[in-house]
Image (cartoon, grey):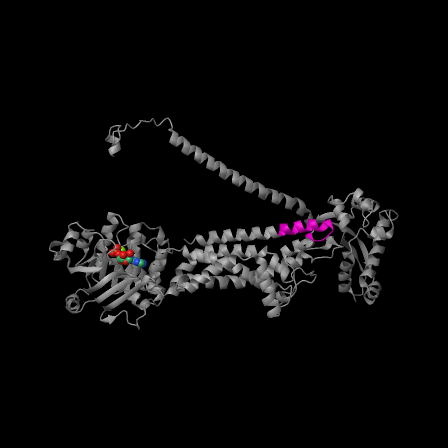
Amino acid sequence: MNDMRPVERIVDTDKPKIAARGCQVYYGENHAIKDVDVDIEDKAVTAFIGPSGCGKSTFLRCLNRMNDTIDVCRVEGDIRIDDEDIYDRKVDPVQLRAKVGMVFQKPNPFPKSIYDNVAYGPRIHGLAKDKAELDEIVERSLRRGAIWDEVKDRLTAPGTGLSGGQQQRLCIARAVATEPEVLLMDEPCSALDPIATEQVENLIDELRQNYSVVIVTHSMQQAARVSQKTAFFHLGNLVEYGETGQIFNNPKDPRTESYITGRIG
Amino acid sequence: MSDATAPATGPAGVRVKKMSLLEQDDRTKRRNAAEKRFQFYGLTAITVGVLALAMLLISILSNGLSAFSQSFVTFEVTLTQEQIADAEASVVKTSKYSAIIKDNFQTALAAQGLADQVSVDDAMGLISKEAAAQLRNVATARMGDDEDVSRSFTFLTNGRIDGYYKGRVTMETAARDSNISPEQLQLADQLREAGLIEKRFNWGFMTMPDASGQRPEAAGLGVAILGSLYMMLVVLCLALPIGVAASIYLEEFAPKNWLTDIIEVNISNLAAVPSIVFGILGLAIFINFAGLPQSAPIVGGLVLTLMTLPTIIIATRASLKSVPPSIRSAALGLGASKMQSVFHHVLPLAAPGILTGTIIGLAQALGETAPLLLIGMVAFVREYPAGPPEGLFDPASALPVQVYNWTQRSDPAFFERASGAIIILLIFLLFMNALAIFLRRRFERRW
Ligand SMILES: Nc1ncnc2c1ncn2[C@@H]1O[C@H](COP(=O)(O)OP(=O)(O)O)[C@@H](O)[C@H]1O
Ligand SMILES: [Mg+2]
């Protein structure tokens, strides 16, 4: 795997994993996302930052069409993953969501056993031929979720009985188990304490090797710590998008600078 | 924080009175008094409720418990094959059997030295008119055997004699009663001393069919219990699947527009429609239009299904609503289809609520009387309905209707039986509610 990476890198930089052009989102009359263009790289962490209500979550949900489940929501424009239009009429959002995993702000494990939580995705997508293979997927996913050591002795215990940080890592493991290509995270650490936050951040850094990760965060420190690219949203506009270092050290737009230095937010 | 360091003067220079924690200020006193008052109101409300319930239970139990025991008279009966053949050949068969019982009873009385206390006919008045039919059942079963029947039989006593032992009939009332005389009661007392008459638990009350107004002692709830069970079966099999499917569709799949709003309002209204209206509807649709038989549990079940559906739909929708949306997003986010998310995650979490709602709906339906009156379930039915499914189309009665029916009859013995039937009805309801609680606990254990 490691030897392959330079080759992959070259391919990656050629083509973004996700490309959005002229994306508009309306909630009824409310124009929540205004004409956003963005290219999201593969095998990198992209952070969306911006003040509350600026549309970060809304845009994130466009990428796996979770907005379809909101009645009043309407999405326009062109969003491509691997150069395929995900809003094409032929696309089944259910299939798309298997490919684009999502981790939510509040940890939401199913009220089932830890094992069943992780095994659910592989089961409904038929990823395992038999029980042994499923066991293997569950273990691998829990290891990637950096929670295996804590739960390996109690896989049959309820997932809802874990601590908040553990629950969130379980949710990440659950998302990883369906072998997605993109992982979307909506403020995954906002309900966690600093120690759990650090664990999840380390995890995100590792996940970068296999996935394209998009993370929404309200913490600029977190964006600076985990991401390679940062997008700053303000009032539904994508104000600035670039290398994380450049956004934080040398923002081009005055609004970005105000936000970074704490004057708007 | 500033409070701790600030001097005892407020920001505007107003002096803040320093209070000791050991004494309560007026505001605290008022607040505590209000709290005490409220607790008192609550306690009063509960006491009134509990008292009302206790009074209800005491009155029903004191009136109805006696229905479960009954006086029986036991003596030897000899029945020759010629007698059987003769009786079966005659036109009024039971009167022949009645005569046989009379002879045998007379013999039994003579053996006790009580033969000349009252006339033979008066002595016969101690035994229920049901006895002849009972003897005939045995006789027809043994007809054609070579042997004669000779064994001891236990017959019900007449309702008045039974009432005498239950305190309903006294020597004074008997003197004014054309159906019974004080002499007969004295004979009964002597027979009781001799051990021929005894009071014991009466299974027949729960197994026998209804009986005519002249023989309250033989009236039982057998047909009514079967009819009620059949109706509950129909309601469960129809209302649960239809109600749950409708709720899942409305709650999870249907678009939110004016049409679904109208449907929603109408379902809530249906829950408030008086039950007798459903009875008229059932009469018009199921009997007059669809041509289903009257008094049949299937029709009763269908009507009660209509009545129960709104209850089940409302309960199911409420429990579906109470499932946190994050569970749905979690499933959808993993690439589950809508149906998978509902059936794998939402429905199991809603199940306890759905079950409770269903059982409450069933319990409501079990006690419902008015619509059943309209579809002819008041009929006097002595034949047991056949086993399901054919039996669903046979005439039957229902528990609450039987209660209503018995309270309409003149013989006070039926009043006791009506209270007994209410006890049975309450036991069924208690059992169903216990089941609801049990199922709820059981399913909730799975987080
Ligand atoms: N489900 C929804 N229905 C209607 N409006 C919504 C919904 N979700 C978000 N919005 C609106 O869209 C805008 C962006 O919200 P959101 O994407 O949640 O912001 P952020 O995640 O950046 O805080 C807000 O004005 C919000 O009111
Ligand atoms: Mg948000």
Classify the position of ligand 1 by quadrant: top left, top right, bottom left or bottom right.
bottom left
Q: Can the viewer see residue A142 in this picture?
A: no
Q: Give left or right: position of B251 versus B282.
A: left
Q: So how many labels did they put on this image?
A: 0
**Which region of the structure is painted magenta?**
B407-424
Q: Can the viewer see residue A249 in this picture?
A: yes
Q: Position of residue B363 (x, y in %)?
A: 56, 55
Q: Is the magenta stretch mostly helix, strand or loop?
A: helix
**Residue B200 or residue B386, whichever sits in front:** B386
Q: Give left or right: position of A26 versus B95.
A: left
Q: Where is residue A65 in the image (x, y as percent from the top left)?
A: 29, 65
- At x 60%, y 51%, the residue is B427
- The single residue placed furthest to the bottom in the displayed view is A90
Q: In which quarter of the image is the N terminus of chain B?
A: top left
- The single residue placed furthest to the left in the displayed view is A250
- At x 19%, y 67%, the residue is A16
**Residue A99 or residue A128, whichever sits in front:** A99
* Vertical comparison of B117 with A76: above or below: above
Magenta span has B242? no
Q: Where is residue B191 in the image (x, y as percent from the top left)?
A: 80, 46
* Vertical comparison of B407 with B300: above or below: above
- The single residue placed furthest to the right in the displayed view is B116
Q: Give left or right: position of A158 versus A165.
A: right
Q: Give left or right: position of B149 versus A196.
A: right
Q: In the picture, residue A42 is in which quadrant?
A: bottom left
**Residue B116 or residue B292, whichever sits in front:** B292
Q: Where is residue B285 in the image (x, y as percent from the top left)?
A: 58, 67
Magenta span has B416? yes
Q: In the picture, residue A171 is in which quadrant?
A: bottom left
